């Protein structure tokens, strides 16, 4: 998969730094490139104005000193406030190359040894710039400051912010100052979805080489604002092999079932959709219409007493009533994929239909009621399905078939991966940060969406899109990733007030947007 959409854990990011050093790159060259990238991103978005750069004692602070020097060289009025002096290494070198004054942020009286704080070290003799004396036992942002660069703590943070750092950042937020975060807003650990207590909401986050989980998971993603990934020169071969990506057409467009000049409708795949009862027909119709945007043929399978309702509401989508589970099993052999679950009913009949379809070996999208019906026996469901199938639960349905897993997992990524491992198939865990996971450990986070997708029938459209892709013989993991992206893109195109019917209508434009050639 393409490098640019990789997501690295904090440890993998450190390993990439070590790999760059092993390849002969000077570590300070990486820090200089990082700080200068921050300065470029700031200059590209704001006119020159007084800026306060808040520097921590570690590598993140070193990036801040470089950014301060680069902004100052461009004529920006720059102040540096430091949470102690760097203890050495590249950060100390960056501090020494900043030629302006540094105001040391004194520790809060409430900060004690129990939090690993204690007294901040005095300025080192090797640094010629004196600290500015604090006012009234503390330090505050100058009245004329109009922009903040937060270089206090990066992705490796493992404890809440010290009170004095939190106070400065809260002051900046209260004054409505835009905050530019270096790597991540201070207080957000790189591998997590939640801040460690308080974290500021940045207008812009500049990270380096690759994104980290916190950049794409909710709610941490919301703290980052716009995220820019800066290339600082780490070679691709120095990067550990990732298993996590941010969703993008580059990951799966090669596997999309593109028709060729001589392709006929049957060659494009046939999708079956299990219909609901006489008064629950809308969900299956939405799924079928969405699937028909991709597959060459779609047929709704329903019980005879609902056939007249479906027949009156379907045009290009075909209809096939069936009278018994055995008849459905026989008919299933005609199709290339099935969607089962949307408004199917939480009943023994739905359970029996899924068992019959699974026995046929046809790839399945299992959604909604077809998941809930196995709440008391998830192992039975897992025994029926295989790696070519896709489960599409929202968090409530996920809890029913994987009880306790979401709460016990550090993030939704780990939860989805473990679910895929248990079920032996692809799992798409819906949400603002939808996660798609395969049994082999691969995972993708889809942030390409809009909250307006939270509307009745939206999930039925998603199930139909994935079903159409499976019918076109797209591999299950790629089909789920593609379906999530298409569904999100359709939502973005429709915008506020969308309905599920609107999503189906724009799928043609979505497909055209990532078409090859």
Image: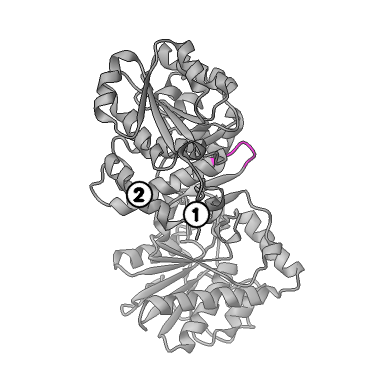
**Residue 411 visible in the snapshot:** no
Which disc, if any, is residue 27?
none
What secondary structure do most residues of the magenta stretch adopt? loop
Tell me the residue that label 2 is attached to: 490
| Mark-to-mark CA distance, 2 and 1 | 14 Å
Q: Does 266 sit left or right of 22 as displayed?
A: left
The relative height of residue 51 versus residue 370 in the rendered view (above or below) is below
In the structure shown, which secondary structural element does the residue marked by tag 2 occupy?
Answer: helix
Image quarter of the N terminus:
bottom right
Q: In front: 441, or 260?
A: 260
- Residue shown at 41% from the left, 41% from the top: 431
Going from N to C along the chain, the mark reached first, 2 or 1, is 1
Q: In front: 492, or 510?
A: 510
- Residue 471, position in %: x, y? 50, 35
- Residue 503, position in %: x, y? 32, 44
Circle 2 packing at 10 Å, graded few (<14), some (14-19), many (20+), is: many
Q: In front: 413, or 60?
A: 413
Tell me the residue that label 1 is attached to: 248
Q: In front: 381, or 354?
A: 354
- Tell me which corner region of the image, top left, top right, bottom left or bottom right, holds residue 309: top left
- Tell me which corner region of the image, top left, top right, bottom left or bottom right, holds residue 42: bottom left
- Residue shown at 60% from the left, 78% from the top: 32
**Residue 335 visible in the snapshot:** yes
Residue placed furthest toward the front: 262
The relative height of residue 173 versus residue 93 in the rendered view (above or below) is above
In the structure shown, which secondary structural element does the residue marked by tag 1 occupy?
Answer: loop
Contact between marks 2 and 1 (CB within 8 A): the answer is no
The relative height of residue 510 versus residue 463 in the rendered view (above or below) is below
Q: Does 420 sit left or right of 512 as displayed?
A: right
- Residue 322, position in %: x, y? 40, 15
Which segment did they paint magenta? 437-441
């Amino acid at each position: 998969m393409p490098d640019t959409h990789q997501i690295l854990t904090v440890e993998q990011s450190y390993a990439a730094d070590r790999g760059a050093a092993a390849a002969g790159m000077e570590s300070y060259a990486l820090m200089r490139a990082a700080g200068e990238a921050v300065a470029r991103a700031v200059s590209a978005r704001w006119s020159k104005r007084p800026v306060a750069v808040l520097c921590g004692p570690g590598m993140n602070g070193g990036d801040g000193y470089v950014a301060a020097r680069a902004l100052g060289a461009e004529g920006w009025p720059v102040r540096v406030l430091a949470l102690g002096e760097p203890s050495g290494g590249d950060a100390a070198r960056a501090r020494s190359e900043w030629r302006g004054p540094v105001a040391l942020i004194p520790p809060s009286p409430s900060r004690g040894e129990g939090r690993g704080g204690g007294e901040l070290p005095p300025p080192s003799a090797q640094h010629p710039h004196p600290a500015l004396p604090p006012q009234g036992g503390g330090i505050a942002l100058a009245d004329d400051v109009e922009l903040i660069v937060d270089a206090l703590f990066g992705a490796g943070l493992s404890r809440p912010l010290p009170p004095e750092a939190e106070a400065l950042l809260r002051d900046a937020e209260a004054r409505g100052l835009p905050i530019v975060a270096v790597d991540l807003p201070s207080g957000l650990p790189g591998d997590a979805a939640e801040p460690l207590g308080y974290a500021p909401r940045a207008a812009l986050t500049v990270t380096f080489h690759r994104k980290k989980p916190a950049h794409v998971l909710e709610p941490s993603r919301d703290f980052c604002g716009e995220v820019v990934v800066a290339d600082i020169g780490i070679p691709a071969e120095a990067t550990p092999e990732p298993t996590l990506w941010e969703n993008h057409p580059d990951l799966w467009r090669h596997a999309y079932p593109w028709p060729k000049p001589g392709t006929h409708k049957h060659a494009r795949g046939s999708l079956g959709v299990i219909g609901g009862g006489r008064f629950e027909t809308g969900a299956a119709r939405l799924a079928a219409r969405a699937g028909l945007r991709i597959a060459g043929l779609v047929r709704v399978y329903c019980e005879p007493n609902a056939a007249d309702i479906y027949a009156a509401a379907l045009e290009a989508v075909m209809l096939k009533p069936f009278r018994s589970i055995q008849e459905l099993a026989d008919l299933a052999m005609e199709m290339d994929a099935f969607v089962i679950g949307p408004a199917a009913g939480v009943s023994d009949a739905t359970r029996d239909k899924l068992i019959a379809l699974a026995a046929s070996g046809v790839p399945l999208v299992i959604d909604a009621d077809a998941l809930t019906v196995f709440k008391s026996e998830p192992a039975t469901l897992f025994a029926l399905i295989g790696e070519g199938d896709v489960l599409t639960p929202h968090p409530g349905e996920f809890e029913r078939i994987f009880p306790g897993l979401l709460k016990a997992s550090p993030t939704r990524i780990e939860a989805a991966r473990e679910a895929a491992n248990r079920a032996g198939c692809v799992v798409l865990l819906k949400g603002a940060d939808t996660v798609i996971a395969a049994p082999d450990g691969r995972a993708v986070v889809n942030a390409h969406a809009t909250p307006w997708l939270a509307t009745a029938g939206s999930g039925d459209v998603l199930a139909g899109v994935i079903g159409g892709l499976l019918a076109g013989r797209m591999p299950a993991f790629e089909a789920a990733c593609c379906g999530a992206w298409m569904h999100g893109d359709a939502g973005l195109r429709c915008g506020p007030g969308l309905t599920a019917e609107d999503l189906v209508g724009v799928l043609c434009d979505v497909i055209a947007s990532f078409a090859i050639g």
